[in-house]
Amino acid sequence: MDILTQGLLGGVLAQSVAKKEETKLATLIGVISGLLADADIFIYSANDPLLNIELHRHFTHSLFFIPFGAAIAMALLWPFLKNHLPAGRIYLYSLLGYSMSGLLDACTSYGTHLLWPFSNERIAFNVISIIDPVFTISLLITLLYSLRVKRQRIAHIGLLLAAGYMLLGFVQLQRATNLTENLISSRGHQATQTMVKPTLGNLVLWRSVYVHQDRIYVDAIRVGLFAKNKIFEGESVDKLSVEKHFPDIEQTSVLYNDIQRFTIFSDNFVAIDPTQKNVIGDIRYSMLPTTTTPLWGIVINRDKPQEHADYQFFRDTRSYIREKFFDMLMWND
């Protein structure tokens, strides 16, 4: 998830076992440790734009890296805290703060190398958005109130509420998935690959993406908590075939290799951007859940096949885009 939520969860986890007199320092250690896993965002190459997205949520988010990540956090904090806390307590709070970074990110749709080095599979449970204000604010309130009263029970309650929200996300995912399967069946399609994910900041409006006969279909699935469900049928686009769409790019070229790397990163949900014919987009993400216009992609320069593809974002925040999103979210006919 976003870096703020990572830090807040780390802080609350440390508070859950902190002695009353150690609450402030435990919170500080937990927050810093919770942020540390996302330091991989600083791994980049000026010559290879895809290196950053390949290594983000990689080894630093692995379950097997947790004790080492905690040790790094402790090493960074030890010079400042050695006169205030024993080494064992610093490591304990660092371990708790770091422990959920990978799992929390795996609950989103981006994909996390949770089982590295034993598996390079990107794991994504798709139960919560990368940014979810309800989840984040609940953790913030828990952390601040626990700091004030210095009681472990407050942190325990906050963690239970956070777990309950994740459980709600899982229930909503199953409901959205069932609606997606019904939609696919009603169209007479046979999906060879399907993904259902929450849209930004909520557990009500979901994006459905599936592949049928080498074509990608996207739809919005509104799963109301109390109101009737609603399907907003969306667009479709031909799935990328390098041999078909870019027959002049040689398989031995750097550009061809970058296309393959981006395809793996995007879980094979890749297509040419309908609005930019020189852009290969990740169709899992879009500003609107009913469109095939990607949120990010790689720019293809056929004249320079031995140079790396450029990775770019295509955010469209115009007012009518926001209004259309909220119309679907609130089901405003």
Image (cartoon, grey):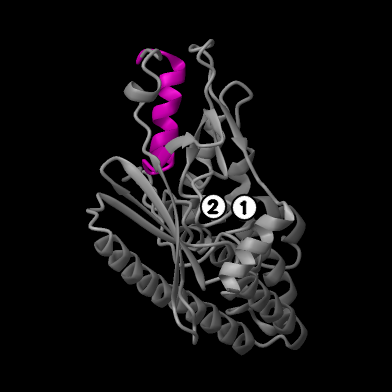
Quarter of the figure with residue 91 = bottom right
Circle 2 packing at 10 Å, graded few (<14), some (14-19), many (20+), is many
- Which residue is at 65% across, 45% downward? 315
Q: Is residue 186 visible?
A: yes
- Which residue is at 60% across, 89% downward? 153
Residue 69's tag is 2
* Secondary structure beneath label 2: helix
Circle 1 packing at 10 Å, graded few (<14), some (14-19), many (20+), is many
Query: In the drawing, does residue 49 fall left or right of residue 269?
Result: right
Q: Amino acid at mark 2?
A: Gly
Q: Is residue 227 above or below residue 29?
A: below
Q: Quadrant of the N terminus?
A: bottom right
Query: In the drawing, does residue 11 fall left or right of residue 83?
Result: left
Q: Nearer the viewer, residue 26 or 260?
A: 260
- Give the extent of the magenta segment: 251-270
| Residue 100 rendering spot, x and y as whole percentages | 51, 64
Q: Nearer the viewer, residue 189 or 198?
A: 189
Answer yes or no: do the residues labelled 1 and 2 have beta carbons within 8 Å?
yes
Q: Nearer the viewer, residue 53 or 207?
A: 207
Give me the C-alpha separation between circle 1 and circle 2: 8 Å
| Residue 79 rendering spot, x and y as whole percentages | 74, 53
